[in-house]
Image (cartoon, rainbow, N blue to C red):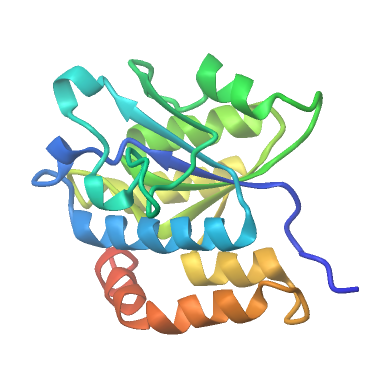
Amino acid sequence: MAKRRILNPALFICDLQEKFRPAIYEYPRVIATTQKMLRAASILSIPVLATTQQRAKLGETCSELGLDSDGPNGIKTLVHSDKSKFSMWTPEVRNALGRQPNQRYSAVIVGIESHICVTQTALDLMAAGHKVYVLADGVSSCNKEEVPVALARLRAEGATVTTSESWLYECMGDAGIEEFRAIAGLVKETKQSTTESLQALCRI
């Protein structure tokens, strides 16, 4: 029987808020990659954990992600919490993941900013014993020059820097799994936006 290659995946969505929209380099491309990952998470039953940074000052999560909707297109999150800490590794997030003692996750991170909240989240997750993947086509910063420096540091610290499509196929690991056809269809459907995100964010 076909089995997935990546066990216990979890999608971390870091601080994708309305007020950051005009400030972040190629923000629409980060949003597009996140939308694809959310659809994949729904297909593959991957838990989603999302945060906002000081929501009262910096606004709600971008509406097109559907994280705040109770409608049929709304995304079910394991946790969607506000924070002042830069890292997503807050008590609320730890509690949401801690339902099984000593369970280790493969955390895949998208969001902002690469060199601050994404970096600190990745470092904290690795310190807690979790495997970390950072999607190069799904993270950015206000200053684009910060991004490659942050990703280089995270590689050196032990995180895996990869792309959304590569991660999805690695997560599946086998074309024989039940969800393969749906994920392959999603990849085909989002080919243009994936290309645009790669060109914008992975050539910095």
Count of numbered marks: 0
Quadrant (top left, top right, bottom left, bottom right) of the C terminus: bottom left
Image coords of residue 153 (percent x, y): 47, 43
Residue at the spot x=29%, y=25% of the render? 53
Depth check, front residue: 58 or 96:
96
Determine whether, in the image, residue 114 is placed left or right of residue 167.
left
Q: Residue lying furthest right in this view?
A: 1
Depth check, front residue: 71 or 115:
71
Vertical order, 182 against 150 (above or below): below
Residue at the spot x=36%, y=74% of the render? 194
Image coords of residue 81 (percent x, y): 41, 24
Quadrant (top left, top right, bottom left, bottom right) of the N terminus: bottom right
Image coords of residue 177 (percent x, y): 76, 74
Residue at the spot x=42%, y=42% of the render? 13
Vertical order, 44 against 86 (above or below): below
Determine whether, in the image, residue 143 is placed left or right of residue 159.
left
Residue at the spot x=48%, y=32% of the render? 121
Q: Residue lying furthest front in this view?
A: 71
Depth check, front residue: 72 or 92:
72
Image coords of residue 157 (percent x, y): 58, 40
